[in-house]
Amino acid sequence: MRLVLAFHGSRGDVQPGIVLGRALVDRGHSVVLAVPPNLVDFAARSGLDAHACGPDTGELLASDLVVSRSKSRNPVRRGRAIAELALQGGLAAQSDLVDLATGADAIVGGSVGQERVLNVAESLGVPYLPVHLCPMRANRSVALVAPGGRHLGPRSTRASWWAIEQALWWAGRRGENRLRAELGLPTAHGPTARRIVGQGVPEVQAYDPAVFADLGREWGSRRPLVGFLDLDPATRAMIGDAHDTDDLDDWLDAGPAPVYIGFGSMSAIDPHRLAAAVVDGTAGHRVLVATGWSDFLRPQSLDPDVRQRLVDAGDRIRAVRTVDHSTVLPRCGVAVHHGGAGSTAASLRSGVPTVICWLGADQPLWGRAVTGLGVGTAFAQATISADTLGDAIARVDTAPTREAAATLRGHLIPAATAADRAAAVVESAITQHQ
């Protein structure tokens, strides 16, 4: 089969597409991978046929739309920002994807930009198979929004998803239908999620049933929870996904297991406050900071007093740009990150306690999950300070949490098995559709 995999967003959104693409190639299929232009080189190093599609997500994630407006406390402003984000670069993304997918047997796509992918699949008359990195459909056990962190109960949880779907639809319906018109498609009259469900194809859930056991029982084969899609060692080596400094292993070996802190592709709400919290809230710990795309701990960008305290910390705090999560996190004592699906999968697979310092989107959901499992805790990055960060680390740096994290690691579906299961679902669905 000829398959086009369309994965938009940050590296954490694209990487599962690489994993699935490699699994499908190994099964003898022809795969084209459509990714943001800033991630084409990264994806191509995996050996897949990677092409640019849609906007540059590095620029998008650093924009006011993402950093500020999409995280507004005003629900109307936030809803409009999310709708605008969904449509950002929509015309270009659709045009690029039409060119890449013409003649394909199916399009497989991630959650980010699913509106565009569904439109293109519909216009070409081929199925669209979604791959979700977190729960995204109405259900009775996992809420996207939980005021005060409390469990809403089955009926209210399900109703909350329908309300969110409807709100997003009303906020973005005009723009959505303009984009559909560009492809000659009829006007849509309901949320994208419900139209995708109406296709009758399975939706791959690329996360683990050990984390959301009730979802696995509720959804069954309609939305199979296949496990986290992680790079295998060979593909990771091809990509060159290693530390960006040669002596990190020596530093890790030179003292107690450090606290890992990293926020991946996300831009900090307040980089200066985040840097101060990292420097001042980790006293008594060695700290490994992966500064990521934002490079928030760069000395020349710090306030003078924070810069001096960072200098005074000496070798206690080690800052690098990137790390290989699969090899570094198991050597750490606690993992602190933003709670993206990829980062959460990495910390859970490492078997160390997790602190999720979330910004928005699905990250609070992951924060509630690790808290409920007893393997971590969570708080909003908007509230970060030396005290909140230090308290969170202290809450999880305990024997019971370490034991729970190690136990959960043993229950997670192996990465190779997850990739094989996801590929099997895709194959079966397309075969039945033909």
Image (cartoon, rainbow, N blue to C red):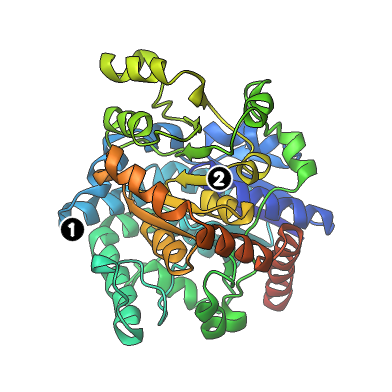
Sequence-wise, the earlier of marks 2 and 1 is 1
Q: How many marks?
A: 2
The residue shown at (28%, 58%) is 172
Three-letter amino acid code at the position of disc 2 = Gly
Residue 402 locus on image (x, y percent): 55, 57
Residue 75 is labelled as 1
Q: Which mark is residue 333?
A: 2
Which residue is rendered at x = 63% and y = 34% of the image? 42
Expressed as whole percent of the image width and height from the top left, the position of residue 25 reads 79, 53
Residue 272 location, x and y as percent? 28, 27
Question: Is residue 252 found left or right of 282 in the rendered image?
Answer: right
Q: Residues within 10 Å of mark 2 (few under 14, many from 20)?
A: many
Residue located at (60% from left, 71% from top): 225
User: As rendered, which of 226 and 198 lies closer to the eye?
Assistant: 226
Mark 2 lies on a secondary structure that is loop
Decide: is 393 above or below 160: above
Which residue sits at x=23%, y=44%?
69
The residues tagged by marks 2 and 1 sit, at their Cα atoms, a distance apart of: 37 Å
Q: Position of residue 105 (x, y in %)?
A: 69, 62
Q: Is residue 421 visible?
A: yes
